[in-house]
Image: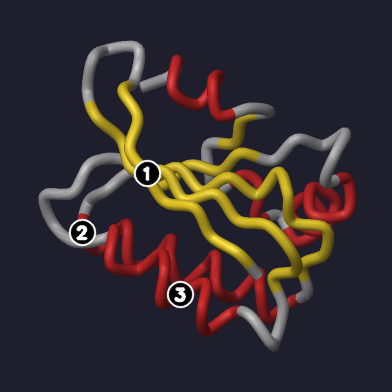
Amino acid sequence: MEFVTGTGIGESGVGVNLVSCSGNLDLETVDEFKHQVLPFLVVGSPTLIIDLTEVGFMDSTGLGGLITALKRARQAEIELELVVNTERTERVGQLLALTGVDILFPTYESQQLALESN
């Protein structure tokens, strides 16, 4: 799994953190995912947008990594949002929907739409 981190400016002019993931989010990569994402989830940090557009496969372990991030975000009172383009990552979107996890996160079809919401 590869990660690209950065920052962006939301529509309101407020900065946000971005983490773009590519590859598979599964048993082999979930520890690296948490290593990359959790440092952004500390008190006082801005919204974090995790872009899963380039994730081709996610298993229950990867889903658990997202839940861990959500718990940490809630503890730190930080908004955590996902980008899941259902045309490109249909399987990831299906897993989120089947498990009901999709209702826990604000989810957008693109980074641009996520930024516009902030």
> Which residue in the protein does label 2 denote?
76
Q: In this view, does 85 lie to the left or right of 65?
A: right
Please state which of the two labelled residues, at mark 1 or mark 3, is closer to the viewer.
1
> Which residue in the protein does label 3 denote?
34
> Which residue in the protein does label 1 denote?
6
Mark linked to residue 28: none
Q: Where is residue 117 in the image (x, y as percent from the top left)?
A: 43, 19
Secondary structure of the residue carrying numbered label 3:
helix
Residue drawn at (37%, 44%), measured in percent from left and top?
Answer: 6
Whichever of callouts 2 and 3 sits on the residue coming sooner in the sequence is: 3
* Residues at marks 1 and 3, CA–CA distance in whole angstroms: 16 Å
* Residues at marks 1 and 2, CA–CA distance in whole angstroms: 20 Å
Please state which of the two labelled residues, at mark 2 or mark 3, is closer to the viewer.
3
Crowding around mark 2 (Cα neighbors within 10 Å: few <14, some 14 to 19, many 20+) is some
Q: Position of residue 57 (x, y in %)?
A: 82, 64
> Where, by quadrant of the figure, is residue 82 drawn?
top right
Q: In this view, does 56 lie to the left or right of 70?
A: right
Q: In this view, does 74 lie to the left or right of 3?
A: left
Contact between marks 1 and 2 (CB within 8 A): the answer is no
- Image quadrant in which the N terminus is located: bottom right
Image height check: is 12 above or below 72? above
Image height check: is 83 above or below 28? above
- Viewer-side residue, 86 vs 96: 86
Residue drawn at (74%, 64%), measured in percent from left and top?
Answer: 23
What amino acid type should be assigned to the residue bearing mark 1? Answer: Gly
Secondary structure of the residue carrying numbered label 2:
helix
Whichever of callouts 1 and 2 sits on the residue coming sooner in the sequence is: 1
* Residues at marks 2 and 3, CA–CA distance in whole angstroms: 16 Å
